[in-house]
Amino acid sequence: MKMKKIAVLLGVILVSGVFVFSTTSPKKESIHVLYPKQMNFAGEAVPYYINDVQERLDREMITNLNYHTNTTLVLKRANKVFPVIEPILKQYGVPDDFKYLAVIESSLVNAVSPAGARGVWQFMPETAKEKGMEVTDQVDERYHLEKSTVAACKYLLEAKNKFGNWTLAAASYNGGMAGISKRLQEQEVADFYDLLLTEETSRYVFRILALKEIMQNPSKYGFDMPKEVLYQPIPVKKIEVDSTINNLATFAKSQGINYKVLKIHNPWLRDKKLINKTGKKYELEIPISGYSKP
């Protein structure tokens, strides 16, 4: 009899559990992304009428909206980095949208790739030298934001001249001009959106588009970024150096800062010294404020 009561009790518990389980549904995550029905890259329309275009854009929108940590960080960094990049793009006649190319290349930090690319714009050594940057053991201007932005502009203008539009120029930044030219010829098409490319290059422009949309409308996509949480530009003065600096730590102290701060603002200095036998002129950034107690 006692065993029967226990069996009945277990049955009630089991039924109750099944009942609770069957009437409680897990929270559903929304995966529907409402982005504009018309988008463009560098003034060139995105052809939504091509079926796979919508799906490819969806993928990058959803990926970035769920990659909260990185998206939040690039929104914060952009407040400090974009004011350096934007006037250079404008000066060279490169559309402002290309600042988002820098975002997907490096997340706006001096990234180092396994292949050997460096800096915000991710230049390989030989390409950097071709575009006028110095790359040595002591000086690596791929880490120089202004100079690498100028080099990126030179590349993009050359690519635009070659392909006739900015979208293919952007794709070539990842796939290479020769690579994109070869695919266009092989597939007998003239438009990026008609090309079958490697997955990385195929996603490239859509990653730019997704970051552009999110970064231009952060609140719309759930990123509340009041001004006080953004990384602020630090006021600096620029000094010209045309001789050897045997000890950068000592030099930093003479400028009222320390070695760490000197390297933060001049990451292109890759050694503890700067040997300059030719009298070449280098411009160093020295912060005016931001590192001492108010």
Image (tube, rainbow, N blue to C red):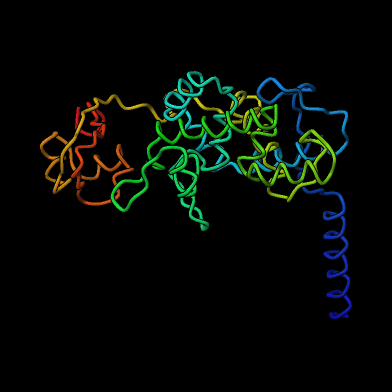
Q: Residue at the location (85% across, 81% down)?
A: 3
Nearest the viewer among 93 and 33 is 93
> In screen coordinates, is 203 left or right of 73?
right
Nearest the viewer among 116 and 234 is 116
Residue 259 in which image quadrant: top left
240 up-or-down from 130: above or below: above
Residue 41 in which image quadrant: top right
3 up-or-down from 233: above or below: below
Q: Residue at the location (85% across, 65% down)?
A: 14
Residue 290 in which image quadrant: top left
- Callout count: 0
Q: Position of residue 154 (x, y in %)?
A: 51, 31
Q: Position of residue 281 (x, y in %)?
A: 24, 33
Nearest the viewer among 90 and 162 is 162
Q: Residue at the location (58% across, 40% down)?
A: 104
Nearest the viewer among 114 and 82 is 114
107 up-or-down from 221: above or below: below
> In screen coordinates, is 240 left or right of 2?
left
Q: Residue at the location (60% across, 25% down)?
A: 97
Q: Quadrant of the C terminus?
A: top left
Q: Position of residue 156 (x, y in %)?
A: 58, 32
> In screen coordinates, is 241 left or right of 180?
left
Q: Position of residue 131 (x, y in %)?
A: 46, 38
